[in-house]
């Protein structure tokens, strides 16, 4: 094992007890240290389930678990807990949340649920002259929550009229959430924190479940995460954190890089280890990364040396518009795929915004190259998936009102919007959940057929809920889908045969995922399945063939979700002012630009062999082509931030025009 570690890494792996900080640049093997350390602890006799490791993305967690399993070999039956912060908090909350007055089977609201709640709240507090959109309200709430601010704090610090209105909305929103027995994503952290602060014995019990806590990407912890880590590590003190201040890219969501910089103050007896050799990228790529990041003035100085000398200089390329840009990138991938030993999985295209991939997807499809969109929720955004998940939610938890409203008359079963209104009015008047009002023998002012329809629906759900207690979950779900004639609904909605088939395939995929979950879980339950789905722990693909392709496909992903990953060939596209740096940050200047620069640095340091940076001279905006300005980072990467060309639309380096490719010299 030690043969694959340098002496400093070895020291970090061997320091098994007490607080440990590994503060080091990109690609120096920090994540490798975490995985080897977990393996080492287990080899030295620590039971795997006494180890908790947290990372920031599901993909990273999965990869880490795979790497650890590989190191340990087949013997490992019990696995260490490797998860995201949010997933771990869900487990803590399921065990303890009742103490705070939430149901044990609390619901986790996704963004769609949050939006409808925000809309409802805004209707209740609408004030003449001042208005907020649901998205604005959620933006404010999210910002407050990620800084650990509760409604009372928000009211105190609100300045403008809009902020006051949002603070009022926040208070209502929280109340409504609790009434619904629900939490949103940010709450998973906030409520856990509250739980630990209010009930010291709960904190002690939860902390006592583990002897070791390891945290990857520590530079991106926000206040809640920071306090939860402290609370969990307080007793055993075996806390290992690794990170790189230059890769802190979640400041906009409340992450504070100071947490990593003051680790030694928090834990005075901490061992601090620095790693200096970058094993990932060639020297040429690393030089570009180092040159770029040096333009950030407030940073912690680190040495980053290449372990792989030489290499091809990053290519900077310019195109007429985004179509030519995407065509070039995909052509380039196709050309390279012909070289021996190259596979689709060796390539990644990185974006700043979620809107950019569309043209690349089209082009990849056209050229028949397998690709996968990483970190995207697109599967869950599909209507049919949301529909089926809503059924599962109501089966798991009848009080889940957003889900219940979604399916109450879907497919149509004679429960008209008016009937729903009447039911909701009763529920509000009596302070009860919608389901409780529906679930009683005589409904009063509902007319005969409407009442029968409601009763029919309630009985159907009850019947299937009862069956799920003792029959295989997936089988019962399949029957329910048939019983409500959902496939027929798809035929009605989508006249095209191909569309119907693809929608039906997604429905089938939900059933498959539930079946798979039931095999893997220790104590399968619908609540457990929904937790995994909501948190993105459970992946869906369309079918087995697509799944296996996804494993060997070109990756399309945002720079934010690329953190921690690596690819032989990386394309950073849309290198223009307004995209990278993002226009919001350009307006804010200062620290916001520094964060964009760190994001660019994260992108550059993902590349192992070759890096290509591209831009379009014009880009469509609201249906019209607009001229662009090259990203300042293109100039900084080659150490020419003062280049007078900077404001003109011609970036440095080799160019590709409309008439073909000018090959860069090696
Ligand atoms: P990031 O800052 O991007 O998260 P990191 O510091 O976590 O990077 P790793 O992902 O752990 O770095 O390692 C980067 C690459 O270098 C990986 O491919 C890893 O296998 C390799 N590597 C790390 N240490 C060594 C070593 N001692 N010998 C050979 N290869 C190494
Ligand atoms: Mg890493």
Image: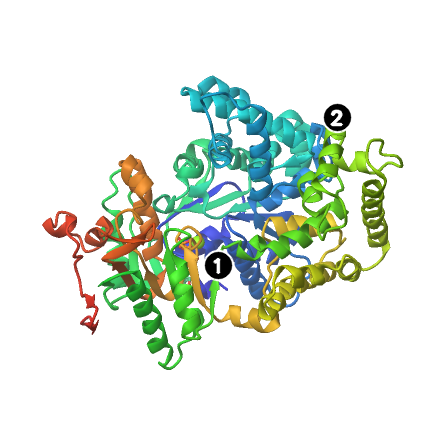
Rendered-image quarter of ligand 2: bottom left
Dot 1 crowding, Cα within 10 Å, few <14, some 14–19, many 20+: some
Look at the numbered disc 2 and give the secondary structure of its residue.
loop
Q: Position of residue 237 (x, y in %)?
A: 56, 38
Dot 2 crowding, Cα within 10 Å, few <14, some 14–19, many 20+: few
User: Image check: 337 left or right of 509?
Assistant: left
Q: Is residue 80 above or below residue 545?
A: above
Q: Position of residue 159 (x, y in %)?
A: 41, 19
The residue at 20%/70% (across/down) is: 664
**Could you tell me which quadrant the C terminus lies in?**
bottom left
**Rendered image: mark on residue 384:** none
User: Image check: 586 left or right of 565?
Assistant: left
Comes first in the chain, label 1 or label 2? 1
Q: Position of residue 156 (x, y in %)?
A: 48, 17
Front one among 93 and 168: 168
Q: Nearer the viewer, mark 1 or mark 2?
A: 2
Distance from label 1 to label 2 (Cα)?
43 Å
Asked whether residue 76 appears in the rendered view, the answer is no
Q: Is residue 367 above or below residue 454?
A: below
Q: Position of residue 575 (x, y in %)?
A: 28, 54
Q: Quadrant of residue 285?
A: bottom left
Task: Please give the residue where the numbered disc 2 appears in the rendered image.
Answer: 431
Task: Please give the residue where the numbered disc 1 appears in the rendered image.
Answer: 374
């Amino acid at each position: 094992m030690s043969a694959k570690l340098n002496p400093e890494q070895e020291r970090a792996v061997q320091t098994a007890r007490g607080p440990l900080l590994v503060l080091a640049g990109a690609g120096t093997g920090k994540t490798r240290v975490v995985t080897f350390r977990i393996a080492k602890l287990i080899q030295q006799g620590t039971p795997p389930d006494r180890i908790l490791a947290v990372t920031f993305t599901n993909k990273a967690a999965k990869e880490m678990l795979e790497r650890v399993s590989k190191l340990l070999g087949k013997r490992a039956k019990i696995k260490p807990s490797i998860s995201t912060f949010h997933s771990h908090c869900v487990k803590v909350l399921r065990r303890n949340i009742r103490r705070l007055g939430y149901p044990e089977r609390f619901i986790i609201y996704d963004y769609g649920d949050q939006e409808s709640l925000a809309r409802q709240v805004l209707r209740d507090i609408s004030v003449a002259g001042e208005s907020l959109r649901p998205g604005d309200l959620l933006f404010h709430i999210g910002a407050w929550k990620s800084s650990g601010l509760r409604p009372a704090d928000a009211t105190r610090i609100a300045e403008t009229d809009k902020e006051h209105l949002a603070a009022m909305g926040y208070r209502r929103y929280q109340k409504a959430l609790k009434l619904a027995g629900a939490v949103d994503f940010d709450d998973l952290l906030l409520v856990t924190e509250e739980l630990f602060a209010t009930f010291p014995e709960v904190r002690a019990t939860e902390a006592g479940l583990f002897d070791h806590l390891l945290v990857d990407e520590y530079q991106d912890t926000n206040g809640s995460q920071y306090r939860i880590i402290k609370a969990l590590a307080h007793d055993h003190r075996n806390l290992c954190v690794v990170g790189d201040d230059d890769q802190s890219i979640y400041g906009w969501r409340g992450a504070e890089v100071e947490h990593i910089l003051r680790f030694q103050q928090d834990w005075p007896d901490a061992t601090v280890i620095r790693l200096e050799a970058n094993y990932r990228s060639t020297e040429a790529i690393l030089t570009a990364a180092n040159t770029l990041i040096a333009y950030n003035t407030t940073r912690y100085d680190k040495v980053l040396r290449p372990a792989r000398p030489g290499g091809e200089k990053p290519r900077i390329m310019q195109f007429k518009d985004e179509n030519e840009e995407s065509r070039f990138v995909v052509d380039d991938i196709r050309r390279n795929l012909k070289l021996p030993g190259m596979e689709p999985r060796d390539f990644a295209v990185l974006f700043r915004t979620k809107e950019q991939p569309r043209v690349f997807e089209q082009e990849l499809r056209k050229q028949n190259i397998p690709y996968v969109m990483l970190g995207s929720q697109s599967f869950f955004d599909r209507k049919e998936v949301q529909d089926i998940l809503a059924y599962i939610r109501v089966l798991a938890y009848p009080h889940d009102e957003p889900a219940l409203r979604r399916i109450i008359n879907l497919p149509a079963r004679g429960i008209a919007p008016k009937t729903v209104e009447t039911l909701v009015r009763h529920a509000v008047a009596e302070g009860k959940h919608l389901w409780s009002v529906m679930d009683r023998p005589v409904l009063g002012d509902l007319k005969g057929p409407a009442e029968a329809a409601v009763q029919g629906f309630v009985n159907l759900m009850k019947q299937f809920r009862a069956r799920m207690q003792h029959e295989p979950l997936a089988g019962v779900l399949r029957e329910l889908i048939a019983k409500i004639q959902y496939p027929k609904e798809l035929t009605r909605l989508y006249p095209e045969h191909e569309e119907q088939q693809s929608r039906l395939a997604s429905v089938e995929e939900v059933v498959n995922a539930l079946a798979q979950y039931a095999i893997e879980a220790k104590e399968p339950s619908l609540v457990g399945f929904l937790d995994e789905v909501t948190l993105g722990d459970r992946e869906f693909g369309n079918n087995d063939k697509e799944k296996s392709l996804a494993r060997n496909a070109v990756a399309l992903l945002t720079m934010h979700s690329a953190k921690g990953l690596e690819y032989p060939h990386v394309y950073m596209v849309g290198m223009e002012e307004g995209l990278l740096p993002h226009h919001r940050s350009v307006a804010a200047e200062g620290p916001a630009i520094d964060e964009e620069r760190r994001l660019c640095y994260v992108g550059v340091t993902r590349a192992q062999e070759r890096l290509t940076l591209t831009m379009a001279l014009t880009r469509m905006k609201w249906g019209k082509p607009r001229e662009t300005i090259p990203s300042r980072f293109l100039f900084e990467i080659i150490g020419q931030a003062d280049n007078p060309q900077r404001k003109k639309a011609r970036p440095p380096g080799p160019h590709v025009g409309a008439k073909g490719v000018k090959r860069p010299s090696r």
